[in-house]
């Protein structure tokens, strides 16, 4: 038997616990998104929530439905009962997870990794409070009013803006516990693991008292006064913050009402309002990469005499592939602008390259037939095919599969090493500055894609965006203001390849590499050896994704041969910035 760690035994995490209490008081509040790294009690807190929900008139036990990471569309929405159909030939419905969560809680762990087509279904039901099933010969409308709770690790990918906005509260869970708290957490956890039944008995009284208080507070909720001045103040702040829609304002007013009722008051305090804004803005504010601190001034090249025109020369080494990376000073870029590039736009608009039937469509190291990978069973066509072949109960079926749609992925690698900020004929003509501006014109036209942005900066490779939107790309690129560090390009390519293998590949997927190609030699390796390792990584990447472009500066001097040698034998298309 599985035991749930009791809500009243959880140490710390006060803001998250208050959010859950407010949702227990007012189930219409709008849902909670818990964000944080692994092991910070997000799932423990969410599962403990069910124990404080008072029983309803129709059910003694409040439904708590957990959506597993690998769930299918059939399981989430409901479909045909396979066992009855196979054994008795009876065509009957199987209840989906959304319907099971009615009047209860729908909990999605790792919600940011949920496939897009499942996210769309959850959005529809969460918005309307009902779910209509029109599939596999079934047609019915069911009630789907539930408290939506999600948890995610932001390092593993972003959440679609539409689903982010569906959660009324968003909390970044941090395990910054004191020594005393950590000691108490470990002690309580050991007691629970040693004898969960006894541990739960000891906390039953506290849980019962908490449920009783929630019932009392629910009855007093409408007695809390929301003044016109408060409504005006909330509207003015939402306007100043440029919040989209009015969902956040509704959440703030509903939250302060719950907070005041929980305290036994009929008026809202300033502390209630401050807490409500924290809860409702925790996931609606933009998250950007940390700004780079420039501790040293930018090195400026000496200006030529005024009677001579400034030479338009490219700041590029003649022979070495990496000397500028050896310097340590950061190079600051000018503010981002939109600057279209004809050849880059042409590559983006070109039709996708068709892959063979055995294309790499999943995160494996071997080909997987496209018609089977990620497919789901289609009962209608399977039944027709089986009946045409004389099927009867007890005989094998002739199964037919339907592959769900997935949004195409756009993978972007931005090389922000120091050399990309040096190359150019002035601050506004530096390669990284021009490339960033050109890429921003693509994002505004590609709202149907899922974006992944990998950045090499200060010698480190990090994901700035995973499964994000075009708007997120544009806003994050505006914060790419510094070129710094060495050019560990091979490390970056391998990291991107691994992420692509995990996500899987469609023919519409694209990869854009933005780099000057100036490799920093790896430890104890010569430039020819580093070049060989880079080519191996690029070949491996191009075996998975065939539509790859490389945005680079104009080829001068020794680089005229260097870059073509790097991409030789691959389908990578070189695109030069003017």
Image (spheres, rainbow, N blue to C red):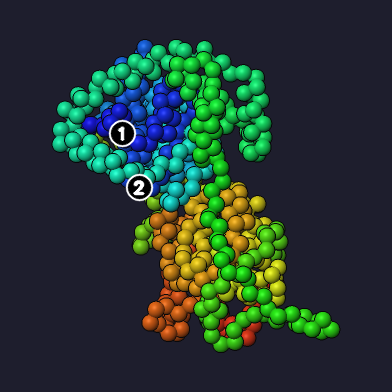
Identify the secondary structure beneath mark 2: loop
Q: How crowded is mark 1: few (under 14 residues within 10 Å), some or many (20 or more)?
A: some
Vertical arrangement, residue 362 with respect to residue 109, above or below: below
Viewer can see residue 467? yes
Viewer can see residue 514? no
> Residue shown at 54%/31% (left/top)?
274
Residue 241's x, y, as percent? Answer: 64, 39
Residue 91's x, y, as percent? Answer: 35, 27
Residue 341's x, y, as percent? Answer: 69, 64
> Residue at label 2?
38
Front residue of 184/448: it is: 184
> Residue shown at 35%/62% (left/top)?
366
Identify the mark nearer the N-term, 2 or 1. Answer: 1
Front residue of 238/302: it is: 302
Identify the secondary structure beneath mark 1: loop
Closer to the observer: label 2 or label 1?
A: 1
Residue 319's x, y, as percent? Answer: 56, 87
> Residue shown at 37%/12% (left/top)?
57
For the residues labelled 2 and 1, the Cα–Cα distance comes to: 17 Å
Q: How crowded is mark 2: few (under 14 residues within 10 Å), some or many (20 or more)?
A: few
Location of the C terminus (image quadrant)? bottom right
Location of the N terminus (image quadrant)? top left
Question: What mark, if any, has residue 10 been given in the picture?
Answer: 1
> Residue shown at 64%/33% (left/top)?
237
For this orientation, the residue located farthest to the bottom is: 319
Q: Quadrant of residue 20?
A: top left
Image marks 2 and 1: residues in contact by CB distance under 8 Å: no
Q: In which quarter of the image is residue 14?
A: top left
């Amino acid at each position: 038997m599985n035991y749930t760690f009791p809500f009243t035994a959880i140490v710390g995490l006060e803001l998250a616990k208050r959010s859950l209490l407010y949702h227990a008081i007012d189930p219409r509040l709008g849902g909670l998104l818990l964000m944080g790294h692994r092991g910070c009690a997000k799932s423990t807190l969410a599962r403990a929530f069910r124990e404080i929900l008072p029983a309803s008139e129709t059910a003694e036990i409040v439904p708590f439905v957990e959506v597993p990471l690998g769930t299918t569309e059939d399981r989430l929405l409901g479909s045909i009962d396979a066992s009855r159909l196979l054994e008795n030939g009876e065509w009957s419905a199987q209840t989906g997870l959304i319907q099971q969560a009615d009047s209860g809680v729908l909990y999605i762990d790792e919600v940011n990794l949920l496939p897009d087509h499942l996210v769309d279904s959850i959005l529809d039901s969460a918005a309307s409070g009902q779910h209509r099933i029109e599939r596999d010969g079934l047609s019915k409308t069911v009630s789907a009013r539930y408290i939506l709770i999600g948890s995610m690790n932001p390092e593993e990918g972003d959440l679609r803006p539409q689903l982010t906005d569906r959660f009324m509260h968003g909390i970044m869970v941090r395990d910054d516990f004191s020594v005393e708290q950590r000691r108490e957490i470990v002690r309580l956890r050991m007691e629970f693991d040693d004898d969960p039944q006894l541990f739960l008995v000891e906390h039953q009284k506290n849980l019962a008292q908490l449920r009783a208080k929630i019932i009392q507070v629910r009855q007093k909720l409408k007695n809390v006064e929301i003044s016109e001045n408060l409504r005006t103040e909330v509207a003015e702040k939402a306007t100043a913050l440029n919040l989209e829609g009015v969902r956040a304002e509704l959440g703030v007013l509903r939250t302060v009402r719950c907070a005041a009722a929980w305290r036994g008051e009929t008026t809202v305090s300033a502390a209630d309002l401050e807490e409500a804004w924290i809860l409702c803005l925790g996931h609606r504010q933009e998250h950007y990469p940390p700004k780079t601190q420039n501790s040293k001034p930018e090195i400026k090249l000496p200006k030529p005499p005024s009677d001579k025109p400034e030479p338009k020369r490219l700041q590029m080494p003649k022979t070495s592939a990496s000397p500028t990376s050896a310097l340590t000073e950061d190079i600051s870029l000018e503010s981002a602008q939109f600057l279209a590039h004809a050849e880059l736009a042409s590559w983006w608009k070109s039709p996708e390259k068709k892959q063979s039937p055995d294309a790499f469509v999943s995160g494996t190291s071997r080909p997987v037939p496209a018609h089977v990978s990620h497919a789901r069973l289609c009962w209608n066509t399977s039944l027709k095919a089986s009946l045409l072949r004389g099927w009867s109960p007890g005989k094998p079926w002739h199964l037919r599969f339907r592959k769900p749609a997935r949004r195409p992925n756009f993978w972007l690698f931005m090389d922000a090493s120091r050399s990309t900020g040096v190359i150019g004929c002035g601050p506004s003509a530096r390669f990284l500055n021009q490339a960033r501006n050109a890429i921003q014109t693509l994002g505004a036209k590609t709202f149907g894609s899922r974006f992944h942005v990998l950045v090499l900066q200060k010698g480190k490779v990090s994901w700035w965006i995973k499964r994000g939107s075009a708007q997120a790309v544009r806003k994050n690129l505006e914060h790419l203001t510094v070129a710094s560090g060495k050019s560990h390009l091979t490390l970056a390519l391998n990291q991107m390849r691994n992420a692509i293998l995990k996500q899987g590949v469609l023919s519409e997927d694209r990869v854009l590499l933005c780099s000057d190609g100036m490799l920093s030699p790896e430890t104890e390796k010569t430039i020819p050896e580093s070049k060989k390792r880079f080519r191996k990584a690029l070949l491996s990447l191009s075996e998975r994704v065939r539509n790859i472009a490389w945005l680079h500066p104009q080829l001068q001097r020794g680089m005229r041969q260097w870059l073509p040698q790097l991409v030789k034998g691959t389908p990578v298309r070189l695109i030069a910035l003017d």
